[in-house]
Image (cartoon, helix red, strand yellow):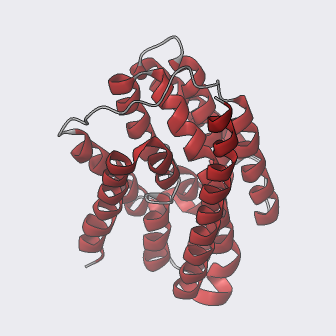
Amino acid sequence: MLLVLKLVLVPALVVAVTLATRWWGPRVGGWLTGMPIVAGPALFFLALEQGDAFASEAARATLVALIGVAAFGVVYAWVALGSAWPVSLLAGWAVFGALTPLLHAVAWPPAVALGGALGSFAVARRWLPPPRGPAIQSASPTWDLPLRVTGALAIVLTVTHLAERLGPGLSGALTPFPVAVAVVLAFAHARDGTPMVSHLLRAFIPAMWAFALFCYVLAVTMVPLGHTGAFAVAVVVQLVAQGAVFWIDGRASVPAATAR
Protein backbone atom coordinates (compact mmCIF):
# COMPACT_ATOMS: atom_id res chain seq x y z
CA MET A 1 0.00 0.00 0.00
CA LEU A 2 2.82 2.42 0.87
CA LEU A 3 4.56 1.65 -2.41
CA VAL A 4 1.40 2.54 -4.32
CA LEU A 5 1.13 5.80 -2.37
CA LYS A 6 4.76 6.64 -3.24
CA LEU A 7 4.12 5.90 -6.92
CA VAL A 8 1.09 8.20 -6.91
CA LEU A 9 1.98 11.07 -4.55
CA VAL A 10 5.46 11.95 -5.83
CA PRO A 11 4.57 12.03 -9.56
CA ALA A 12 1.44 14.05 -8.79
CA LEU A 13 3.48 16.75 -7.03
CA VAL A 14 6.11 16.85 -9.78
CA VAL A 15 3.47 17.06 -12.53
CA ALA A 16 1.65 19.88 -10.73
CA VAL A 17 4.82 21.96 -10.33
CA THR A 18 5.93 21.31 -13.92
CA LEU A 19 2.61 22.34 -15.42
CA ALA A 20 2.48 25.45 -13.24
CA THR A 21 5.92 26.45 -14.52
CA ARG A 22 4.76 26.09 -18.12
CA TRP A 23 1.56 28.03 -17.54
CA TRP A 24 2.79 30.87 -15.33
CA GLY A 25 6.45 31.32 -16.18
CA PRO A 26 9.82 31.22 -14.40
CA ARG A 27 8.91 33.27 -11.33
CA VAL A 28 6.05 30.97 -10.31
CA GLY A 29 7.97 27.92 -11.52
CA GLY A 30 11.08 28.72 -9.49
CA TRP A 31 8.93 29.53 -6.45
CA LEU A 32 7.02 26.23 -6.67
CA THR A 33 10.20 24.22 -7.29
CA GLY A 34 11.35 25.45 -3.86
CA MET A 35 8.56 23.45 -2.22
CA PRO A 36 9.49 20.09 -0.63
CA ILE A 37 8.01 18.03 -3.47
CA VAL A 38 10.69 15.34 -3.05
CA ALA A 39 12.02 15.75 0.50
CA GLY A 40 8.53 16.17 1.97
CA PRO A 41 7.19 12.80 0.75
CA ALA A 42 10.52 11.13 1.57
CA LEU A 43 10.38 12.34 5.19
CA PHE A 44 6.71 11.38 5.44
CA PHE A 45 7.40 7.82 4.31
CA LEU A 46 10.42 7.60 6.61
CA ALA A 47 8.13 8.48 9.53
CA LEU A 48 5.64 5.79 8.52
CA GLU A 49 8.26 3.09 7.93
CA GLN A 50 11.01 3.93 10.44
CA GLY A 51 9.22 5.82 13.19
CA ASP A 52 8.86 9.41 14.32
CA ALA A 53 12.24 9.67 16.08
CA PHE A 54 14.02 8.48 12.93
CA ALA A 55 12.12 10.96 10.77
CA SER A 56 12.79 13.79 13.22
CA GLU A 57 16.54 13.25 12.95
CA ALA A 58 16.25 12.87 9.19
CA ALA A 59 14.43 16.22 8.98
CA ARG A 60 17.25 17.86 10.95
CA ALA A 61 19.78 16.33 8.56
CA THR A 62 17.75 17.55 5.59
CA LEU A 63 17.80 21.05 7.05
CA VAL A 64 21.60 20.99 7.25
CA ALA A 65 21.87 19.66 3.68
CA LEU A 66 19.94 22.66 2.38
CA ILE A 67 23.17 24.63 2.73
CA GLY A 68 24.53 22.37 0.00
CA VAL A 69 21.46 23.07 -2.14
CA ALA A 70 22.18 26.81 -1.88
CA ALA A 71 25.76 26.16 -2.98
CA PHE A 72 24.49 24.03 -5.89
CA GLY A 73 22.38 26.92 -7.17
CA VAL A 74 25.19 29.48 -7.02
CA VAL A 75 27.73 27.19 -8.70
CA TYR A 76 25.28 26.18 -11.44
CA ALA A 77 24.45 29.82 -12.20
CA TRP A 78 28.07 30.95 -12.51
CA VAL A 79 29.28 27.93 -14.48
CA ALA A 80 26.29 28.32 -16.83
CA LEU A 81 27.61 31.71 -17.95
CA GLY A 82 30.35 30.00 -19.93
CA SER A 83 29.36 26.33 -20.17
CA ALA A 84 26.53 24.13 -21.41
CA TRP A 85 24.06 22.50 -19.05
CA PRO A 86 25.90 19.14 -18.57
CA VAL A 87 29.02 20.89 -17.25
CA SER A 88 26.96 23.26 -15.10
CA LEU A 89 24.93 20.39 -13.67
CA LEU A 90 27.97 18.26 -12.86
CA ALA A 91 29.70 21.23 -11.21
CA GLY A 92 26.64 21.96 -9.05
CA TRP A 93 26.19 18.33 -8.04
CA ALA A 94 29.90 17.99 -7.30
CA VAL A 95 29.75 20.92 -4.88
CA PHE A 96 26.64 19.52 -3.19
CA GLY A 97 28.26 16.09 -2.93
CA ALA A 98 31.51 17.47 -1.50
CA LEU A 99 29.92 19.94 0.92
CA THR A 100 27.17 17.78 2.41
CA PRO A 101 29.43 15.19 4.15
CA LEU A 102 31.51 18.02 5.63
CA LEU A 103 28.39 19.69 6.98
CA HIS A 104 27.20 16.46 8.56
CA ALA A 105 30.51 15.91 10.30
CA VAL A 106 29.39 18.70 12.67
CA ALA A 107 26.61 18.35 15.25
CA TRP A 108 23.94 20.91 14.31
CA PRO A 109 21.11 21.52 16.78
CA PRO A 110 17.88 22.23 14.88
CA ALA A 111 17.87 25.97 15.65
CA VAL A 112 21.49 26.35 14.51
CA ALA A 113 20.77 24.30 11.39
CA LEU A 114 17.81 26.57 10.61
CA GLY A 115 19.99 29.66 10.97
CA GLY A 116 22.64 28.12 8.73
CA ALA A 117 20.12 27.20 6.03
CA LEU A 118 18.37 30.58 6.06
CA GLY A 119 21.71 32.39 6.04
CA SER A 120 23.05 30.29 3.17
CA PHE A 121 20.06 31.14 0.97
CA ALA A 122 20.33 34.83 1.83
CA VAL A 123 24.00 34.78 0.80
CA ALA A 124 23.29 32.66 -2.27
CA ARG A 125 20.70 35.14 -3.56
CA ARG A 126 23.30 37.93 -3.35
CA TRP A 127 25.97 35.82 -5.04
CA LEU A 128 23.89 34.90 -8.08
CA PRO A 129 25.08 36.53 -11.30
CA PRO A 130 22.71 39.25 -12.55
CA PRO A 131 20.29 38.23 -15.32
CA ARG A 132 21.78 38.83 -18.75
CA GLY A 133 18.59 39.18 -20.72
CA PRO A 134 14.83 38.73 -20.36
CA ALA A 135 13.19 35.48 -19.33
CA ILE A 136 11.85 34.10 -22.62
CA GLN A 137 10.30 30.66 -22.18
CA SER A 138 9.87 28.40 -25.19
CA ALA A 139 7.79 25.24 -25.51
CA SER A 140 8.92 22.24 -23.47
CA PRO A 141 9.65 18.86 -25.10
CA THR A 142 7.18 16.08 -24.37
CA TRP A 143 9.78 13.90 -22.66
CA ASP A 144 10.91 16.34 -19.96
CA LEU A 145 7.98 15.58 -17.63
CA PRO A 146 8.62 11.81 -17.47
CA LEU A 147 12.28 12.54 -16.72
CA ARG A 148 11.38 14.84 -13.83
CA VAL A 149 8.99 12.26 -12.40
CA THR A 150 11.58 9.49 -12.74
CA GLY A 151 14.27 11.53 -10.98
CA ALA A 152 12.01 12.44 -8.08
CA LEU A 153 10.77 8.87 -7.68
CA ALA A 154 14.33 7.55 -7.75
CA ILE A 155 15.29 9.71 -4.76
CA VAL A 156 12.21 8.84 -2.68
CA LEU A 157 12.31 5.11 -3.43
CA THR A 158 16.07 4.83 -2.89
CA VAL A 159 16.14 6.74 0.39
CA THR A 160 13.15 4.95 1.89
CA HIS A 161 14.34 1.52 0.72
CA LEU A 162 17.86 1.96 2.13
CA ALA A 163 16.87 3.96 5.22
CA GLU A 164 17.72 1.24 7.74
CA ARG A 165 21.23 0.86 6.33
CA LEU A 166 21.80 4.57 5.77
CA GLY A 167 20.52 5.71 9.16
CA PRO A 168 18.52 8.90 9.76
CA GLY A 169 21.42 11.31 9.20
CA LEU A 170 22.43 10.10 5.76
CA SER A 171 18.82 9.43 4.74
CA GLY A 172 17.92 13.02 5.58
CA ALA A 173 21.02 14.38 3.88
CA LEU A 174 20.09 12.69 0.61
CA THR A 175 16.42 13.76 0.50
CA PRO A 176 17.12 17.34 -0.70
CA PHE A 177 19.57 16.16 -3.36
CA PRO A 178 18.92 18.70 -6.14
CA VAL A 179 17.06 16.54 -8.64
CA ALA A 180 13.83 18.44 -9.26
CA VAL A 181 15.52 21.84 -9.53
CA ALA A 182 18.40 20.33 -11.52
CA VAL A 183 16.03 18.99 -14.17
CA VAL A 184 14.19 22.34 -14.32
CA LEU A 185 17.46 24.28 -14.64
CA ALA A 186 19.00 21.93 -17.20
CA PHE A 187 15.97 22.06 -19.48
CA ALA A 188 15.66 25.84 -19.14
CA HIS A 189 19.39 26.23 -19.80
CA ALA A 190 19.36 24.04 -22.91
CA ARG A 191 16.09 25.41 -24.25
CA ASP A 192 16.11 29.10 -23.32
CA GLY A 193 19.73 29.95 -22.42
CA THR A 194 21.47 31.33 -19.34
CA PRO A 195 19.08 34.27 -18.71
CA MET A 196 16.31 31.82 -17.84
CA VAL A 197 18.64 30.01 -15.40
CA SER A 198 19.23 33.21 -13.48
CA HIS A 199 15.54 34.13 -13.43
CA LEU A 200 14.55 30.67 -12.16
CA LEU A 201 17.17 30.67 -9.41
CA ARG A 202 16.18 34.15 -8.25
CA ALA A 203 12.69 32.78 -7.61
CA PHE A 204 13.82 29.37 -6.35
CA ILE A 205 16.32 30.47 -3.68
CA PRO A 206 13.98 32.73 -1.64
CA ALA A 207 11.33 29.99 -1.76
CA MET A 208 13.81 27.67 -0.02
CA TRP A 209 13.47 29.74 3.16
CA ALA A 210 9.99 28.24 3.53
CA PHE A 211 11.45 24.78 2.78
CA ALA A 212 13.91 25.29 5.65
CA LEU A 213 11.08 26.23 8.03
CA PHE A 214 9.19 23.10 6.93
CA CYS A 215 12.15 20.90 7.86
CA TYR A 216 12.73 22.73 11.15
CA VAL A 217 9.12 22.27 12.24
CA LEU A 218 9.32 18.54 11.46
CA ALA A 219 12.60 18.20 13.35
CA VAL A 220 11.26 19.76 16.57
CA THR A 221 7.62 18.55 16.53
CA MET A 222 7.77 15.05 15.05
CA VAL A 223 8.31 13.28 18.37
CA PRO A 224 6.02 15.34 20.64
CA LEU A 225 3.17 15.65 18.12
CA GLY A 226 3.59 12.47 16.11
CA HIS A 227 3.97 12.45 12.33
CA THR A 228 0.36 13.43 11.59
CA GLY A 229 0.42 16.54 13.78
CA ALA A 230 3.98 17.45 12.81
CA PHE A 231 3.27 17.33 9.08
CA ALA A 232 0.03 19.27 9.51
CA VAL A 233 1.86 22.09 11.31
CA ALA A 234 4.83 21.96 8.91
CA VAL A 235 2.62 22.21 5.81
CA VAL A 236 0.76 25.22 7.23
CA VAL A 237 4.03 26.96 8.12
CA GLN A 238 5.44 26.13 4.68
CA LEU A 239 2.43 27.55 2.83
CA VAL A 240 2.26 30.73 4.90
CA ALA A 241 6.01 31.36 4.54
CA GLN A 242 5.96 30.48 0.85
CA GLY A 243 3.11 32.89 0.23
CA ALA A 244 4.85 35.66 2.17
CA VAL A 245 8.07 35.18 0.21
CA PHE A 246 6.20 35.28 -3.10
CA TRP A 247 4.35 38.47 -2.12
CA ILE A 248 7.44 40.24 -0.78
CA ASP A 249 9.56 39.23 -3.76
CA GLY A 250 6.84 40.39 -6.13
CA ARG A 251 6.61 43.80 -4.47
CA ALA A 252 10.39 44.17 -4.56
CA SER A 253 10.46 43.42 -8.29
CA VAL A 254 7.90 46.11 -9.16
CA PRO A 255 10.17 49.15 -8.58
CA ALA A 256 12.97 47.46 -10.52
CA ALA A 257 10.67 46.75 -13.44
CA THR A 258 9.35 50.32 -13.32
CA ALA A 259 12.87 51.73 -13.27
CA ARG A 260 13.76 49.87 -16.43
Residue 13, visible in the rendered structure: yes
Report the side of 152 relative to 64 (left or right): left
Q: Is residue 56 above or below residue 18?
A: below
The picture places residue 244, in percent across and down from the top left corner, at: 65, 63
Query: Which residue is situated farthest in the left direction here?
Result: 142
Q: Nearer the viewer, residue 257 or 151?
A: 257
Q: How many marks?
A: 0
Quarter in which the C terminus is drawn: top right
Q: Position of residue 133 (x, y in %)?
A: 52, 21
136 relative to 201 in the view: left or right: left
Q: Give the residue at x 40% y 21%.
A: 86
Please tell me in which quadrant of the rendered image residue 59 appears: bottom right
Q: Residue at x 29, y 56 (%)?
A: 15
The residue at 48%/22% (across/down) is 194
Give the residue furthest to the top: 82
Q: Between 175 and 246, which is closer to the camera in this rendering? A: 246
In this rendered view, identify the residue nearer to me: 223 or 212. 212
Residue 153 makes an appearance in the image: no
Q: Is residue 196 above or below residue 49?
A: above
Q: Residue at x 50, y 60 (%)?
A: 36
Q: Quadrant of residue 58?
A: bottom right
Left-right relation of 124 to 55: right
Asked if residue 141 is positioned above or below residue 204 in the image, the reply reads above
Residue 70 image-quadrant placement: top right
The x and y percentages for residue 238 are: 59, 68
The image quadrant where one finds the N terminus is bottom left
- Residue 110 x/y as whole percent: 76, 64
Seen in the picture, residue 208 relative to 192 is either above or below; the reply is: below
